[in-house]
Each structure stands twice: as C-alpha cells, then as structure tokens.
Amino acid sequence: VQLQASGGGLVQAGGSLRLSCAASRSIFSINGMAWFRQSPGERRELVAGISSRGDAVYADSGKGRFTISIDNARNTVYLQMNNVKPEDTAVYYCNVGRLDSNTYYPYAYWGQGTLVTVSS
C-alpha cells in the first residue's frame, strides 16, 4: 500500500486545517488507518485512528478538536484539525494498521509526512 499525505501548512493558533491521506488501494481491504505526528526530538505519537467501518480513537491531545474520517469511495482518510495550538506543530504521518478494542496497531506502511506549523 502506498500512502500520499497532503494538506499541511502554516496556520495561526485557533485556526483550522484538514489533512488528507490517499491510499493506493481500496480501504475496504485495510482494517484501519491513522494519523501520527512527530515533533523534533520527540517520539512519533498517535493522533487518531479509524477502522474501515468508521470506529475511531483519539489521543487526549486532540479530543474535542480533531476529527478523523474516512471516504471509502476515494480511498482517503482525513484529519480535520480545529482550534489548533502551537504544540500541534509537527510532521504528520498517515499509517495503515489495525483498530482492535479501541487500540490502534500500526503496520509498517507510512506516508511521506506533511508538516503542520502553528504560529502563536
């Protein structure tokens, strides 16, 4: 599976941004997808994950502000980011994996990353 992430950029604190990740094959054949992020010097962390059925899990940092969604017809997963904060600044990566019992398990399929910079 090849993943193409897009939508990053520079946004002011309190603003919104939508990230997209297009998969090279049907999401129906994929159990789940997710967004991770990584800041300089930090470990890559889960932001949100979703199953092909639409079940979703979120990290505490994004609850109430971020929404992950899936468009099976377009083989695309989105991350709507609202009320962004400077601490959301990171490279965001999409991933193919498995969502099971509210836990997301990443597989070794990663997009190239898209940079989100939030200015204060």
Image (cartoon, helix red, strand yellow):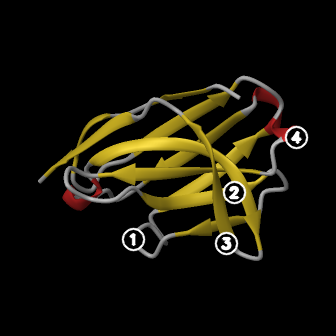
Q: Earlier in the sequence, mark 2 or mark 3?
A: 2
Looking at the image, is 19 positioned above or below residue 35?
above
Q: Please give the residue where the numbered disc 1 appears in the rendered image.
A: 61
Q: Which marked residue is nearer to the observer: mark 4 or mark 1? A: 4
User: Residue at the location (74% across, 63% down)?
Assistant: 99
- Disc 2 residue type (three-letter): Ile
Q: Please give the residue where the numbered disc 4 appears in the rendered image.
A: 28
Location of residue 69 in the rendering, given as x and y in whole percent from the top left corner: 66, 50
Residue closest to the eye, 31 or 107: 107
Looking at the image, is 104 positioned above or below residue 73?
below
Q: Residues within 10 Å of mark 4 (few under 14, many from 20)?
A: few
Q: Residues within 10 Å of mark 3 (few under 14, many from 20)?
A: few
Q: Residues within 10 Å of mark 1 (few under 14, many from 20)?
A: few
Tags 2 and 1 touching, CB below 8 Å? no
- Secondary structure, mark 3, is strand
Q: Please give the residue where the numbered disc 3 appears in the rendered image.
A: 103
Q: Which marked residue is nearer to the observer: mark 3 or mark 1? A: 3
User: Residue at the location (47% across, 40% down)?
Assistant: 18
Tags 4 and 1 touching, CB below 8 Å? no
Mark 2–mark 3 Cα distance, whole angstroms, equals: 10 Å
Q: Which marked residue is nearer to the observer: mark 2 or mark 3? A: 3
